[in-house]
Amino acid sequence: MNRTVIRGGLVITAADELHADVLVENGRVAALAAHGTDAAAGWSAEHEIDATGTYVIPGGVDAHTHMEMPFGGTQASDTFETGTRAAAWGGTTTIVDFAIQSKGGSLREGLDAWHAKADGQCAVDYAFHMIMSDVTAASLKEMDALVGEGVTSFKLFTAYPGVFLSDDGQILRAMQQAASNGGLVMTHAENGLAIDVLVEQALARGERDPRHHGEVRNALLEAEATHRVIKLAQVAGAPVYVVHVSAEEAVAELARARDQGLPVFGETCPQYLFLSTDNLAEPDFEGAKYVCSTPLRPREHQAALWRGLRTDDLQVVSTDHCPFCFKGQKELGRNDFSKIPNGMPGVENRMDLLHQAVVDGHISRRRWIEIACAAPARMFGLYPKKGTIAPGADADIVLYDPRAEQTLSAETHHMNVDYSPYEGKKVTGRVRTVLSRGVPVIDGGRYTGRAGQGMYVPRATSQYLD
């Protein structure tokens, strides 16, 4: 019997805050008891962890990452090994990455390729969504089999013509299939065909700097596509989850649909909450570091995103972690913003940035845990195995020091990328210790995990739809 007791911390879940000790047995939470009570005092274990002065929180669930993702003639700079190690350093103990169906290929081939990349490499647990690049009668049928084996969400794009874009008919068919098999369709909602026109026109005018990336990907084109996928889902009788919401107008579309009682969900990302078009406009091509899609918006959009998180019109904060090094990768677009690889690092910073949001008064402590741990676990069929601290849950537990101060920097982060979008930002709060299924992977500022310690986790269907 492998037992660990965590004593003296403030346990915070999405539902509760309590001064409690936690008993871990064989990789799972066995019991909680109020600190100082006879029940807690009676526990014996091989390992005792002193959590005095820390928050004891569930490991983070980052439901949107892209490790080793090919894009624009290059690929994301984090491998499953480096990316999941960085996730652990940042207090995230589960990622849900995206397997990609190739045009003309099957879903199965895409999923197998991503299993091959991740198998034996991950420091923390992982699962997969499926990107559908080619909606055909065969791939629609495959969706049913994938749901049956624990890949229960499918991403479709209204953006990137010629690469990922699906037309409205294809999206409708996939949503109809999901309505019948219990899957959840995720959408990247931007009007890619219209954006391509604006890109062509901007380049013809000689507008080539990174800041123009944000201008051509107009907020109204995000709102239009968000409205459209909501209506398609309504026609299909299916739920829809809109990824990386960045614009106030898109939040309004989600809020309107949810006010009508529709099963419509949305995520945003730290970059939209903390960064803006001011970063895209940084001189000497520095703005390329901040090129991602959906793009960063003017700062005034941030208030709507924070409000959406407080009112639950946005349920989840994920990272869309898709890092490309500034040297040699972002530089591919030095004279043409449309050739800058789209993506930013962030898997290591999410929990800290959202704790800073607690410090700043944007959200409560329990809401921090809700949007970073519990809601993504529920949304994607991992709860209560992941996302909470309760008897029977996996012992994915973080000891978090709420008073420690740190400065975010590429010098000290563990992501395999040569810059930090948050370079020099001071935040309050820091991960001290991380357990993955009861095993320490970060211990007092040291990495004690290993590649292959993380396990693949099949998922149930979304628990928001039960």
Image: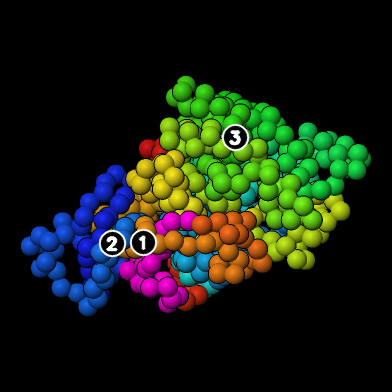
Query: The N terminus appears in which quarter of the rendering?
Result: bottom left
Counting from the top left corner in percent of width and height, residue 17 is at 26, 49
Q: CA distance from mark 2 to mark 3?
A: 36 Å
45 vs 353, nearest the viewer: 353
In the image, residue 434 above or below residue 371: below
Residue beneath label 2, please?
53
Q: Label 2 amino acid?
A: Gly
- The answer to whether residue 156 is visible is no
Residue tagged 3: 301
The type of residue carrying mark 3 is His
Tell me residue 429's x, y (percent). Answer: 41, 58
Mark 2 vs 3, N-terminal side: 2
| Cβ atoms at labels 2 and 1 below 8 Å apart | yes
Q: Disc 2 versus disc 1: distance between alpha carbons? A: 7 Å
SS majority, magenta: strand
- In this view of the protein, can residue 451 be seen by the observer? yes
Instruction: Specify the farthest residue to the top.
Output: 260
Numbered label tally = 3
Residue lying at 16% horizontally and 59% vertically, measured from the top left: 35
Up-down relation of residue 214 to residue 418 (above or below)? above
- Choose the circle earlier in sequence order: 3 or 1: 3
Q: Nearer the viewer, residue 286 or 437?
A: 286
**Around disc 3, counting alpha carbons within 10 Å, would you say few (fewer than 14), some (14 to 19), or many (20 or more)?**
some
Under mark 1, the amino acid is Asp
Q: Secondary structure at mark 2?
A: loop
Q: Quadrant of the C terminus?
A: top left
| Residue extent of the magenta highlight | 427-449
Q: Earlier in the sequence, mark 2 or mark 1?
A: 2
